[in-house]
Amino acid sequence: DKQARSHEIRFTIKPQYRSLLFGFRGKTISGLRQKHDVRIDVSNNQPAIAVPTSADNDDENNKEE
């Protein structure tokens, strides 16, 4: 469980779609948090970064062979 919770994905949401994600008074994003038992942090100050996925790691491992 600890390993699964340490996984992190960061991405940018275009301003025109933010209201769809948050919903009225944050109802949509709160529902996502509860339904999927995840932590969702929202910040306007941090740029998006690339986070390697297991598929990316598999590709790197295959190149070394």
Image (cartoon, rainbow, N blue to C red):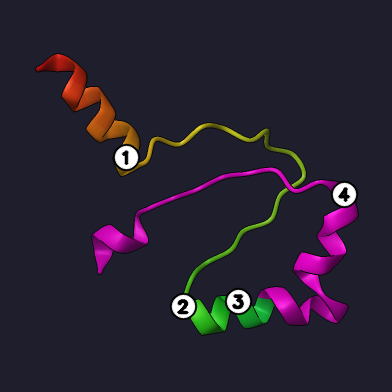
Query: Going from the N terminus, do you reach mark 2 or mark 3 first?
Result: 3
Tell me what residue is drawn at x 76 percent, y 82 percent: 27
Q: Which mark is residue 25?
A: none
The residue singled out by tag 2 in the image is 37
The magenta-colored residue range is 1-29
Q: Do tag 3 and tag 1 residues touch (Cβ < 8 Å)?
A: no
Q: Is residue 41 left or right of residue 22?
A: left
Q: Three-letter amino acid code at disc 4?
A: Pro
- Give the quadrant of the N terminus: bottom left
Structural crowding at the residue carrying mark 2, measured as other residues with C-alpha within 10 Å and reported as few (<14), some (14–19) or many (≥20)? few
Percent coordinates x, y for residue 35 in the rendering: 53, 84
The residue singled out by tag 4 in the image is 15
Q: Which mark is residue 32?
A: 3
Query: Which numbered mark, 2 or 1, is in the foreground of this view?
Result: 1
Q: Three-letter amino acid code at disc 1?
A: Ala
Q: Three-letter amino acid code at disc 2?
A: Asp
